[in-house]
Image (tube, rainbow, N blue to C red):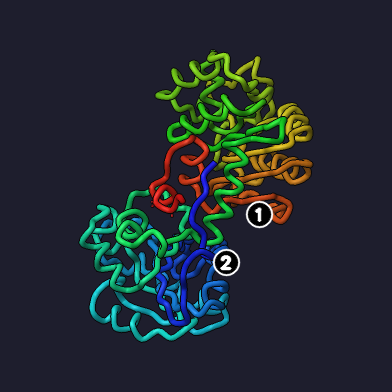
């Protein structure tokens, strides 16, 4: 098990300055934040640090501006929302480093907050550059990381920066601790049966987590585009369905590896002649295959029943990836049904990754899930057993 240094161990005094690395890489429509979960989830840490008299220099990346200042990726839209959620004034710095920002940081009183502009406006961030980290370090005497969602990146604010501090002055925040606590219920399962439900468009990028899960889970239920590839690898005619041809060999290997988990594929599929303007939608058993001009867009009712049955008897559930094109109502049934089944299961339920989180939130069942990870790629890498740079540096 991984245990990290926690904020209660930091020798903070009133007015101590903390560099607070968060993952405020939130979805935006223009300057409107469409989902503020990643901000909300940091509030407990902010509250605790402020209660202890700390002043916070809050830093994050947003998008992938590739080392250049780009207004499209400004963190400015986060400023107002953060201030509202915290219920206090939050100051702004136009750059995450430099004399002006250092001055603003040095003037922060106990409990004050300063949000600094996108870390990725500097090349040094993604390059894990030590000189850039030295500049960041000038802003604070302590370092706290709650950016679990970015902790699989060996970037300066995640990796090089905490290494510049003495170990006693760095810690993981409450969100980081919570993520690790729950995701370790997947890597170190104690309550069985453990059922993993996997979907989403592609296999690529999910091979490692899949390989880990077939070794630890009792059953792995596969739906969505991922299932198409497994079915195609099994010789099922998939017509024009999205199939990740390059991963077919891997799918074949995983399916025949004699792993611990029983791999359960769809029994039936909802198929159509077109995604955008379907004229004919029908349900077919996989044994018959998909017509040459048709494509699989959701799991069918028999599959829903089979998967729901497995989830019902589970004691631990991990879910990543939708079961079909759930953005379209006609093809959302499978994903919605799985959301319900996961929510109703008498189990520890953990949802990781962007789209499945969206599905859970849309369905209104979010409060019945034990843990919804704020990390997409990070949660998948973590359950694969990979060492995350941002976590490793915080270990006791
Ligand atoms: C995410 O949204 O997955 C994290 O914020 C990491 O972002 P990245 O994939 O651009 O590194
Ligand atoms: Mg990402």
Is 306 placed above or below 165 here? above
Identify the mark nearer the N-term, 2 or 1: 2
Residue 361 is drawn in which quadrant?
bottom right
Front residue of 332/52: it is 52
**Residue 53 visible here:** yes
Residue ID for mark 1: 362
**Label 1 CB sits under 8 Å from any ligand 1 atom:** no
Left or right of 329, for residue 116: left
Residue 20 is drawn in which quadrant?
bottom left
Viewer-side label of 2, 1: 2
Q: Quadrant of the N terminus?
A: top right
Q: Position of residue 317 (x, y in %)?
A: 67, 38
Q: Residue at x 25, y 65 (%)?
A: 134
Q: Residue at x 61, y 51 (%)?
A: 372
Is 324 placed above or below 361 here? above
Is 276 placed above or below 137 here? above
Residue ID for mark 2: 40
Q: Position of residue 307 (x, y in %)?
A: 72, 30
Q: Position of residue 158 (x, y in %)?
A: 37, 56
Left or right of 135, for residue 267: right
């Amino acid at each position: 098990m991984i245990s990290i240094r926690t904020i209660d161990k930091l020798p903070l005094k009133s007015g101590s300055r903390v560099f607070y690395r968060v993952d405020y890489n939130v979805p935006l429509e223009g300057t409107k934040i469409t989902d503020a979960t990643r901000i909300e989830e940091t509030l407990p840490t902010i509250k605790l640090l402020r209660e202890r008299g700390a002043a916070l220099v809050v830093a994050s990346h947003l998008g992938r501006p590739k080392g250049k200042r780009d207004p499209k990726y400004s963190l400015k839209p986060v400023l107002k929302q953060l201030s509202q959620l915290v219920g206090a004034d939050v100051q702004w710095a136009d750059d995450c480093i430099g004399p002006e920002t250092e001055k603003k940081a040095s003037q922060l009183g106990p409990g004050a907050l300063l949000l600094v502009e996108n870390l990725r406006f500097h090349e040094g961030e993604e390059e894990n550059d030590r000189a850039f980290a030295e500049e960041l370090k000038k802003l604070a005497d302590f370092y706290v990381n709650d950016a679990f969602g970015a902790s699989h990146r060996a970037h300066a604010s995640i990796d090089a920066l905490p290494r510049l501090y003495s170990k006693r002055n760095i810690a993981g925040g409450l969100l980081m601790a919570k993520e690790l606590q729950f995701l370790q219920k997947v890597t170190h399962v104690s309550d069985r049966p453990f059922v993993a439900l996997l979907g989403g468009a592609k296999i690529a990028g999910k091979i490692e987590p899949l390989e880990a899960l077939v070794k630890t889970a009792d059953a792995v239920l596969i739906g969505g585009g991922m299932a198409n590839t497994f079915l195609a690898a099994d010789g099922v005619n998939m017509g024009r369905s999205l199939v990740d041809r390059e991963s077919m060999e891997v799918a074949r290997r995983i399916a025949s590896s004699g792993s611990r988990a029983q791999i359960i594929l769809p029994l039936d599929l909802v198929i159509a002649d077109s995604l955008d303007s379907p004229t004919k939608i029908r349900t077919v058993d996989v044994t018959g295959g998909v017509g040459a001009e048709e494509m699989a867009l959701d799991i069918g009712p028999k599959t829903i029943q089979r998967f729901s049955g497995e989830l019902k008897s589970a004691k631990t559930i991990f879910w990543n990836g939708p079961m079909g094109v759930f953005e379209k109502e006609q093809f959302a049934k499978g994903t919605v049904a799985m959301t319900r089944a996961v929510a109703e299961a008498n189990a520890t339920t953990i949802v990781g990754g962007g789209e499945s989180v969206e599905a859970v939130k849309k369905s209104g069942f979010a409060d019945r899930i034990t843990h919804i990870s704020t990390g997409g790629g990070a949660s998948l890498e973590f359950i694969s057993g990979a060492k995350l740079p941002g976590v490793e540096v915080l270990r006791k």
